[in-house]
Amino acid sequence: MKETILGMTGLDWAYLGAAFAAIGGGIGSSIGITSIANTAAGIVSEDSEKFGKLLPLAAMPGTQGIYGLVTMILVFVFTGIFAGTADLTAAEGLRVFYACLPVTFLCLVSGIYQGLTAVGAAGMVARRDEDAGKALIFPALVETYAVFSLVVTILMLLYVTG
Amino acid sequence: MSRVRPIYDPLRYGYAVGRVRVLETKLLKRSYFERLLDASDFAEQRRILSETVYGGSLEGALTANDVEHALDAGLSALYQDFLETANLPVGIVSYFRTLHDYENLRGRFKAEALGIPAAEFIGPLGSVPAEVFAGPSAGLPRSLAAIEAKLREALTGEDGSIVIGEIDAVVDRQLQAELLSIAQGSGSGFLAELARLGIDIRNARAFVRARIRDLPAASAARWFAPGGSVTPAEYAALYKLPLADAGNRLTALGVFRGLDPEALIDPARFDVAMDSVVTRRLHVARMVAIGPEPVLAYVLAREAEARAVRTLLVGKLAGVSTDVLRSRLRDVA
C-alpha cells in the first residue's frame, strides 16, 4: 500500500498542485482581461482609432494564465507523468504541491491587479495617443512579479524533482 | 464589499468609464469659453459651438428660450446615455433625477402661487416627462404625489394659499435631506460627499442672503439644513457677527476652508466660488481609475459646462457686457 498524507498519494499532490497553478493563473487572467477589455471597449466605442494601441494592454493580463499552464506542463514533465514513469512518495508529491503555490497565488492576484493597472493606463491612451508606449510600462511592472513567481516555481520544481 | 471592488467595479463600470475617458477630452476648455466671450454676437457664438457637441442642437436657435431648450435636450440625452444605460446603481440614478423632480415641484408651487401656467417652470430632466409635472397632482406618480403633498402641507398658509416666500426654504430642506439619504444608501462615498457638499453650499448661500437682508436670527435658522460640514448651530452662532467677520470665520470651517472670504459673502461671486469647490472635488473623482466616480464626475462636469454655455449665450443675447459675463464664468474642465 502506497504512503499517503491526508489520504493523498504523492501523485495526487502533484496533480493538485498542477491543477491549482492552472486554475489560479486562469482566474487571474480572465478577471484581468475582462476588466481592461470592458474599459477598452468603451474607449473604442467613442474613438475606434485607439483599438491598436489598446490591444497590447488588453492582452497583457493573459500571461498569468500562460504561466499557470506552463507550470502544469512542467509538473507533468518533471514528475514523469507525461512519460508514464511517475513514482513519487507522498512527501515528494507534497513538495511539488508547495512548489506550485507561488504561481497559483501570485498569478491569481497579479492578473486581477494588472487588469486594474491596465484600466488606468487605458485612460492615459484615451487622453493622449502619444502616451501609448508609456502606458504599457505600468502594467508591465505588475508582470514582473508574475514572472518572479514562475521562476520560483520552476526552481522549486527543479530542486524537488532533481 | 470593499474587498471585491477590484473585481466588481471594472466589470460593472468599465465600459462607461472607458467612454468617459474619451469624452472628457471633448469637454470645452477655458480657451473655448474665452472665444465665446469675445464673440461679437450670438450668431458668432453659435458658429464657434458648431464644431462641439452643442452644434447640432443649437443650429436653429435664435432666442434665449431656444438656447434653454437646446441645452436641456443635450442634458436629457446625457442623462439617458450615462445615468440610465451605464449600469450605475439605482441610488446614483435616483440622486440626479430626484434633484430635478424637486426643482420641478418647486416650479409647480411657484406657478401656483403666482397664478401662471406651471409649464413655464418645468424642466425635462425629472423622472417623469415635463407634461406630467405641468399637469394636475393626480397625474403624478404615487411617490412624487406623496412628496408634493408633504411639501404642500408645509407651504400652505392660514388662508389656504401657498406662501411664496417659504417655497425655497421648505423645498431646499426637504430636497437636501432626501439627497443625503439617497446618497448614503447608494453605497457611493463620492456621492455622499457630494450630497454633504450640496448641503454646505445651500446653507452658506442661505446664510449670506439672510444676513444681507438682515432677517431675524430665528427666521434665518429655518434655512439651515443639517448634514453639512458646518452645522446649523455654527451658522446660528456666526449669524450674530457682522457679515465680514462671519465670512472670515466661515472660511476657517469645513469645506469653505481656504476660500476668499470676500467672495463668500458677495452674492455676485458666491456661485463662482462654490463652483470652484465642486470642481476641485470633481478633479479628485476623475483620478479614480475605475468605479462610479469618473462617470459621475463627467455627468457633473457636463452639467457645469451646459450652465456656463447657457450663461454666455443667453447673456450675449440679453446684451450683458463681456466683463460681467467673464466674472460669471466658471472652470468646468
Image (cartoon, rainbow, N blue to C red):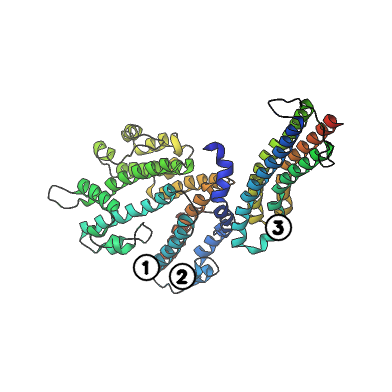
Q: What is the CA distance from the residue labelled 1 to the residue labelled 2?
A: 11 Å
Q: What chain letter is assigned to the residue under label 2? A: B
B2 and A50: which is toward the camera: B2
Residue for point 13% across, 47% down? B158
| Amino acid type at mark 2 | Leu
Give the label on residue B65, or none.
1
Name the quadrant of the N terminus of chain A.
top right
Instruction: Using the rendered view, name the quadrant where residue B203 is placed.
Output: top left
Q: What chain letter is assigned to the residue under label 3? A: A
On the image, the x and y values in percent for residue A147 come to: 77, 40
* Circle nearer the viewer, 1 or 3: 3
**Disc 1 residue crowd, few under 14, some 14–19, many 20+, Cα 10 Å:** few
Q: Secondary structure at mark 3?
A: helix
Give the label on residue A98, or none.
none
Q: What is the CA distance from the residue labelled 3 to the residue labelled 2?
A: 35 Å
**Disc 2 residue crowd, few under 14, some 14–19, many 20+, Cα 10 Å:** many
